[in-house]
Image (cartoon, grey):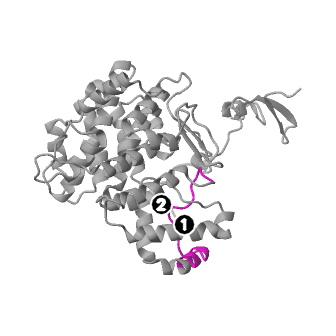
Amino acid sequence: MPKDTLTLTDNRTGKTYELPIENSTIRSMDLRQIKVSPDDFGMMAYDPAFMNTASCRSRVTFIDGEKGILRYRGYPIEELAEKSNFLETAYLILKGELPTRQQALEWENNITNHTMLHENIKKFMDGFHHDAHPMGILVSTVAAMSTFYPLGRNIHDPESRKRQIQRLIAKMPTLAAFAYRHSLGRPYAYPDNDLSYTENFLNMLFKATELKYKPDPALARALDVLFILHADHEQNCSANTMRSVGSSLTDPYSSVAAAAAALYGPLHGGANEQVLKMLAEIGSTDKIPSFIKSVKDGERKLMGFGHRVYKNYDPRAKILRKTAEEVFEVTERSPLLDIAIELERIALEDEYFVKRKLYPNVDFYSGIIYQAMGFPTSTFTVLFAIPRTAGWLAQWEEMLQDSEQKIARPRQVYLGHGQRSYIPTEERG
């Protein structure tokens, strides 16, 4: 009869080992029993960049990269993007279920009540140079918030966790908007609690001298969709950082700051900016064939195509292509969109890219949309960090409540020198 086990034979010793299989995985610690001699440390799995290692068990996000599927708590991303809003989706990610009408009202009210910043946080932000990168300001200020809310260290108190989660989700747009306006030398625009989450963010970004800022509903909705699509994405670099730092039982502000720092890198949160640079470099649709040729020749990279997880069309990219068209109905149409659409068409018909399973990812269209809405490229990663905070906090809380989780401490394969004796300075070669 079939058994849920894996049988391994160590050809060095001839010994056979039977390892239990659970959820299509074996436990790496079970490999430690495979030894050549009693004083041998035991077998380890070597997996740089965690290409095929599960570091946790999660119920938050499901991805099937081969089929192009993304679901939050079981709900397809397509349905959430069409029917939900960001705050409702954030509730789903954090709580596990969509809220009732009453729960949604209470959740939105709690978030709204925490949008204001302590005035000393504003003074802290004033200390940054005028040309400081908005993401650098955001990372530093989120970390500094841990000193303003010391009770956040009570991470094993459910009520304390709930309060810090509400504060972080509420204050991230305010921090992001203040960082943006600081970079322009503009006065800060305070939150307007009469507005929705995304409307209020646009208000804090773009309000000038008017008494009441009225965001375009289409742009606020587009931002809602973008925030939903970026809310979580399984065990990516920043989520893994959130869990790793959080495993030391530090406060959520420090953990979110660490996750945001991981997002700051161009291979993670800065990819959509690279797409814009590529499209601007191409310049016009008639130059796409020569650009495609240079990609095949290894001279250039096709940014916004391909993904570590997706070996099919990124479902988020499909949604954003439609969103881009809706945004351009109320803004000036970017010539980059026509280049992007034609580049996508050619690439998807080219055997070179199809064979390599290089399909558009979420970054391919998001940068074009953000640019059309008036966001400078320096803010793109900040825009990513706002919704991803909900995902980071869901991953963090799940990790804290997992009895199997311990402080993150991966092993290494040591390839350095064996024991050596110290050589006095005058005797060194």
Of the numbered discs 1 and 2, the one sitting upstream in the chain is 1
Q: Residues within 10 Å of mark 1 (few under 14, many from 20)?
A: some
Q: Is residue 341 left or right of residue 376?
A: right
Magenta span dominant secondary structure? loop
Q: Amino acid at mark 2?
A: Phe
Where disc 1 sits, the SS reads helix
Above or below — where is 107 with respect to 265? above
- Where residue 207 sits in the image (x, y, percent)? 17, 51
Q: Residue at x 58, y 53 (%)?
A: 308
Q: Is residue 303 left or right of residue 54?
A: left
Q: Which residue is mark 1?
A: 344
Tell me if I can see residue 338 in this picture: yes
Where disc 2 sits, the SS reads helix
Q: Residues within 10 Å of mark 2 (few under 14, many from 20)?
A: many
Q: Residue 369 lies in what quarter of the image? A: bottom left
Q: Residue at x 60, y 61 (%)?
A: 358
In the image, is residue 299 part of the stretch drawn in magenta? yes
Q: Residue 46 lies in what quarter of the image? A: top right
In the image, is residue 368 part of the stretch drawn in magenta? no
Q: Which residue is mark 2?
A: 364
Evaluate if marks 1 and 2 touch, with contact meaning CB atoms under 8 Å apart.
yes
Q: Quadrant of the N terminus?
A: top right
Give the magenta part as a residue range: 291-311
- Where residue 310 sits in the image (x, y, percent)? 60, 51
Taking depth in this image into account, of 394 and 290 the one nearest to the observer is 290
